Image (cartoon, coloured by chain):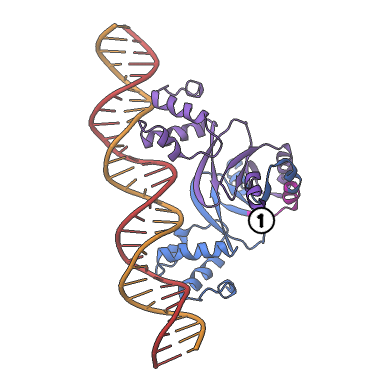
Chain colours: A purple, B blue, C red, D orange
Amino acid sequence: MSVLEDRGYRSTAPRRAIICTLEGKQAGFTVEEIGNELPEVGRATIFRTIKLLMEAGVVCRLNLLDGAPKYSLSSIEHHHHTVCVRCGNVGEFRAATVERLLRALADDIPGDIVGHRVELYVTCNDCVSDESG
Amino acid sequence: MSVLEDRGYRSTAPRRAIICTLEGKQAGFTVEEIGNELPEVGRATIFRTIKLLMEAGVVCRLNLLDGAPKYSLSSIEHHHHTVCVRCGNVGEFRAATVERLLRALADDIPGDIVGHRVELYVTCNDCVSDESG
DNA sequence: ATTTTATTGATACTGAGTACCATGACATCG
DNA sequence: CGATGTCATGGTACTCAGTATCAATAAAAT
C-alpha cells in the first residue's frame, strides 16, 4: 500500500480501493473483475492504476495463449507463471534453475540478455482429477 | 505451401498469396504489414489465414512486452524467441537445455506440463554497437 | 456442367487499452 | 485553516487487434 508514497504518487481514494481489492486476489485476475468489484471507480482509472503498479513492479501482465489478458500480483520478487490450459487458473513459481539456465544460454545468444519470461502451460491437478475421475 | 492440402483446406488465391508473402519474411512480422503488401486481400481473410496457419503449427504469435503483437514463421520445429528491447527485432533460437530444464522442473510444478514458452529480452548486437559507438 | 460446400470480403461489431478534457481532489505553502 | 498549483478522475470518444455476420463467389466433387 506504500507503493504510492514510495514513488511519489498521490494517495487517492480510487487508487487505495484498487490496491486493496488487488491484495485480496489470486494470481490471474482480470481488469474487468476489478471493475465489477469497484463500480464507483472509472474504467480509465483502473487501467491507469494497473499500469502504474506494473511500472512499480507490483503487478505483472501475463499473455495467455488465446487472448483474455490477465494480471497477477508480484508478491514473489521475480517469478514465472503456470497457466492451466483447461480452467485458465494461473499459478506462480520460482526456480533458480531457470535463472542458471539463462546465464548458461547467454553465450549462445547474440546480443545482451536483459530480461526473460517463462510461461508453462499445464493441466492443473484439479483438471487432471476431473479427467480421470 | 502444402499446408493447405495437408489439412484439407481449399487452395485459394488469397491463401496462396498470403503464404507466399509470409515465406519471404523475417521473424516478427505484423498482420498490418501483410495487409499492406496484399491490398487486394481482405483484412478478415488475412486474420483467418494466419489463424489457420497457427493451428497448423506453421506460424506462431509472440506477445511482446508492450502490445504490438507480432508473428513468426515456425521454420524451426520447436523454438523460442529473442526480442530486442530497443529495435524490436525478433530472433529465434533453439536450445536443448531449455527442454531439459523443463523436464527437470516438472517435479516441482503441480499438474502436468503440456507446453511452454520462453522469451528472452535482449539488446541485439546492432543496438549494442549503436550504444557504444 | 452443375451442385455442394468452403471461402471471401465488406461491414459492423467486441474488448482491451488510451487520448482528451473539463471537473474535482490532493498536498503544499503561507 | 484557507488559497493555489498540480495531479488525478471519469466520462466519452477513440484506436487497434481480432471476430461475427452474411450475401456473393470460387473450389471441389459429382
Q: Is residue B63 visible?
A: yes
* Of A124 and B80, the residue lying toward us: A124
Q: Residue at x 56, y 61 (%)?
A: B54
Q: Residue at x 42, y 33 (%)?
A: A37
Write down the region rendered in magenta. B92-102
Report the side of C3 relative to A132 (left or right).
left
Q: Which residue is mark 1?
A: B79
The quarter of the image holding the N terminus of chain B is bottom right
* Of D3 and B87, the residue lying toward us: D3
Please state the horizontal and vertical placement of residue A116, each as a whole percent of the image: 63, 42
Question: In which quarter of the view is residue A18 placed?
Answer: top left
* Of A113 and A68, the residue lying toward us: A68
Please state the horizontal and vertical placement of residue A8, each as a whole percent of the image: 46, 22
Q: Residue at x 60, y 45 (%)?
A: A83
Q: Is residue B111 magenta?
A: no
* Of D8 and A8, the residue lying toward us: D8
Badge 1 density bin: few <14, some 14–19, many ≥20, Cα 10 Å: some
Does residue C17 sit above or below B69 in this rendering? Answer: above
Residue placed furthest toward the front: A133
Magenta stretch mostly in which secondary structure? Answer: helix
Please state the horizontal and vertical placement of residue C25, each as a whole percent of the image: 33, 21
